[in-house]
Amino acid sequence: MQKIKLFSGILVTVLILMSLCACINSNYSSDDLDQRELVLNAFNSIITNSGGKILQINNSENVWSEINVTVSDGFIGSVALNTNWNTDCYGKCIVESIKNSGMIANNSVVTVNYYLNKNLVSVYSSETGPKVYYNFE
């Protein structure tokens, strides 16, 4: 009888821990309206404060780990250093906005792809940083 009580006690404890883990994990992979609104407000703020460098920010097919950004010529500037700085600066802001909303876990890798006229200009990765692909001639 004691073995049955011990076994059922362990089973209940394991079930409680599993449900707790499921709640924590679902919080980080959630896509509720409040979180979406927080991210979209942050994106609108970034666009507004970019001085016309960023025209649009979209998540790629409802995947928050890949973001597509449409940029203007002002984003490119005249030298690679300027584009690298913009890629890094805005990339960090976009990634932080997504992670702070709880849309994805803080340890998730987010990639931000920057496009000028449908051409890939640069990429920011929360794991590796900025990389410029634009060909300065």
Image (cartoon, rainbow, N blue to C red):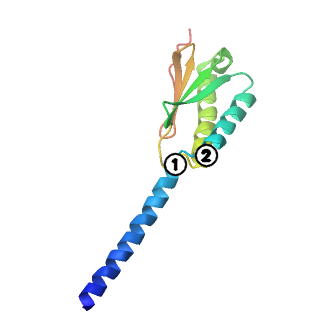
How many neighbours does mark 2 have within 10 angstroms: few (below 14), some (14-19), or many (20 or more)? some
Say whether disc 1 or disc 2 marks the residue closer to the N-terminus.
1
| Residue 59 visible within the image | yes
Q: Are marks 1 and 2 in contact (CB under 8 Å)?
A: yes
Residue ID at (50%, 38%): 110
How many neighbours does mark 1 have within 10 angstroms: few (below 14), some (14-19), or many (20 or more)? some
Q: Which mark is residue 20?
A: none
Instruction: Identify the residue under disc 1.
Output: 30
Q: Is residue 55 left or right of residue 25?
A: right
**Quadrant of the snapshot with the C terminus:** top right
Residue ID at (61%, 37%): 94
Q: Which mark is residue 35?
A: 2
Q: CA distance from mark 1 to mark 2?
A: 8 Å
Image location (x, y in percent) of residue 26: 48, 54
Q: Amino acid at mark 1?
A: Ser
| Residue 130 visible within the image | no
Image location (x, y in percent) of residue 85: 62, 29
Based on the displayed image, in which of its 4 quarters is residue 70 positioned? top right
Based on the displayed image, in which of its 4 quarters is residue 36 positioned? top right
Foreground: 76 or 26?
Answer: 26
Residue ID at (54%, 44%): 31
Residue extending furthest toward the bottom: 2
- Numbered disc 2: secondary structure: helix
